[in-house]
Amino acid sequence: MEKLLIAIALTCQPGDRLVDFGGRLPRDLQFIDLLISVQPFHARLYVYQPGFPKNFQQCCSNKPVSVLRVPVGGGRFCIRQSQPHMKWRVRGLLRPDIEM
């Protein structure tokens, strides 16, 4: 029962899509920039880590392309779209972490 609860907590909400960059990212990377493009341009995407749907970042309000800087965590992200038949594309931009 405990394993089932953990598995449920680490999944996306119903209707949201799981994107897994886990095996493709360097281990010491703390943040990743996600280059996101959407069609139509007024559509939105919401990106959050699995199990934390209330801690989301919103993307692309009235812009066709936007960049979100998100913490890597385990390299897995959930994506919720604002419209059912919209088109979107997500690319990860790998850069070393820069401190200012």
Image (cartoon, rainbow, N blue to C red):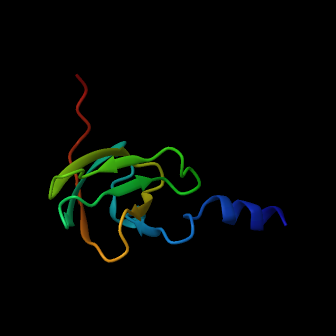
Q: Is residue 60 above or below residue 21?
A: above
| Residue at 35%, 45% in the rendered image | 70
Figure quadrant of the C terminus: top left
| Residue at 66%, 58% in the rendered image | 9
Please give left or right for residue 98 compared with residue 23 in the image. Answer: left
Q: Residue furthest top?
A: 100
| Residue at 54%, 64% in the rendered image | 12
The picture places residue 46, in percent across and down from the top left corner, at 39, 55
The picture places residue 55, in percent across and down from the top left corner, at 50, 44
Figure quadrant of the N terminus: bottom right
Q: Residue furthest left?
A: 64
Q: Is residue 97 visible?
A: yes
Compare residues 22 and 61 and report the one nearer the observer: 61
Please give left or right for residue 29 compared with residue 65 in the image. Answer: right
| Residue at 15%, 56% in the rendered image | 65
The quadrant holding residue 5 is bottom right
Compare residues 39 and 67 and report the one nearer the observer: 39
Please give left or right for residue 84 compared with residue 49 in the image. Answer: left
Q: Is residue 57 above or below residue 26?
A: above
Q: Residue furthest bottom?
A: 85
Q: Residue furthest right?
A: 1
The picture places residue 4, in percent across and down from the top left corner, at 76, 68
Compare residues 76 and 16 and report the one nearer the observer: 16
The picture places residue 86, in percent across and down from the top left corner, at 28, 73
The quadrant holding residue 90 is bottom left
Q: Is residue 91 above or below residue 59?
A: below
